[in-house]
Amino acid sequence: MQVYDKIIVGAGLYGLYAAQKCGAAGQRVLVLEKDAGPFMRATYINQARVHMGYHYPRSYSTAIKSAHYFERFCRDYDFCLLKEFDQVYATSAHFSWTNAREFRDFCAAANIRCDDVAPTKYFNPGQCDGAFLTTEYTYDAQVLKEYFLKELAKLPNVTIAYGHKPEAVERVGSAWRVKAGDIAAEAPFLLNATYAGVNELHAMLGFEPFKIKYELCEIILCTVDDRLKNTGITVMDGPFFSIMPFGQTGYHSLTSVTFTPHVTSYDSVATFECQSRSGGKCRPGDLYNCNECPAKPASAWPMMSQLARKYLKPEYGFQYAGSLFSMKPILKASEIDDSRPTVIRQYTSDPAFVSVLSGKINTVYDLDEVLQYGADHE
């Protein structure tokens, strides 16, 4: 039986950030990851947007939190960012929750850049009532992954075990005892950083699940014409789209509010019809990697591309290159105001069990307090 100071479940950004921080402080850390490597799900398969807050005009608290951490994230992880492009936000003239004036007022209140630009520069006539140059970047998950692996390799007190999913977790005195394949380990602190799998560990331990819905999402990768190469465009606030550089890869990601989610589950652990066609790889309570699943859906490219071309002028051309799929959990309460809070809940203290749920990369710093003090933080 190996004894550690902290056991972390999940090797996405939140898991590896916690491992690096605690390991650098001299703690013995074990990271358990069910996939064959780190950053194979949501940390990699998303818009790769380093949020400044623009995406949340109806949730001021989310916007302020994003802006607050933006500079710190850019300072700490500048090497993985792509900054040299125009990030354009636009408000749709039709069916939008936010118009141009309201977006300007929101940006002024949040104290974030919002420079007017003529909508006719980018959009077909009558489609958008406002367009704005903003300051927002994109990160490259593969570059960030290599950084964390390099830093963690310097810490002999940190062990990462891939292909290891907790099969049994029990409380033994002031420690959690975890069995995962050939590993048996104990620690007084257990961090659940599994994102879409967050409720799976809760179910195993009998803790109250997060009230979330699950969306099986598609990120489309595109090659783009020269006019779009150094430009990212997001039309909001409603059933619209975004096309922007995908880290440092040379591709653009294409997403849409309507078509990026293919199917939704409201069960406490993700339950989908496609699981019956996964060859036993995926089931409720044990999510497989959607991007590698034989039952992943056909691409929504025809609908997504049609929507984007309805808005964009023809000279901003883009072509299909491929699709990435992942599971996205969203707090059900967020359906009301489009908020995306980072939720960190400590369920027990001796031993400590903490779960984190966040869909934004630059709010990873919210972990600092609970990792250092083990205090309840939400």
Image (cartoon, rainbow, N blue to C red):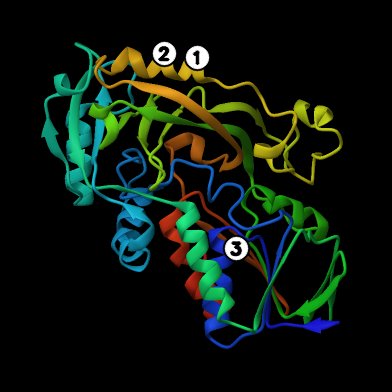
- The kind of residue on which mark 3 rests is Arg
- Which dot marks residue 310? none
Q: Is residue 16 above or below residue 230?
A: below
Q: CA distance from mark 2 to mark 1?
A: 6 Å
Q: Is residue 194 above or below residue 366?
A: above
Return the residue at label 2.
306
> Closest to the observer: 152 or 124?
152
For disc 3, the neighbor class at 10 Å (few under 14, some 14 to 19, many from 20) is some
Q: Which percent across, then down, holds residue 218?
A: 55, 31
Q: Which percent across, then down, holds residue 195?
A: 62, 52
- Which dot marks residue 302? 1
Q: Is residue 107 left or right of residue 213?
A: left
Return the residue at label 3.
345
Q: CA distance from mark 3 to mark 2?
A: 41 Å
- The kind of residue on which mark 2 rests is Gln
> Closest to the observer: 115 or 325?
325
Q: Is residue 76 left or right of residue 86?
A: right
For disc 1, the neighbor class at 10 Å (few under 14, some 14 to 19, many from 20) is few
* Circle 2/circle 1 CB separation < 8 Å: yes
Q: CA distance from mark 1 to mark 3?
A: 40 Å
Callout in the foreground (1, 3): 1
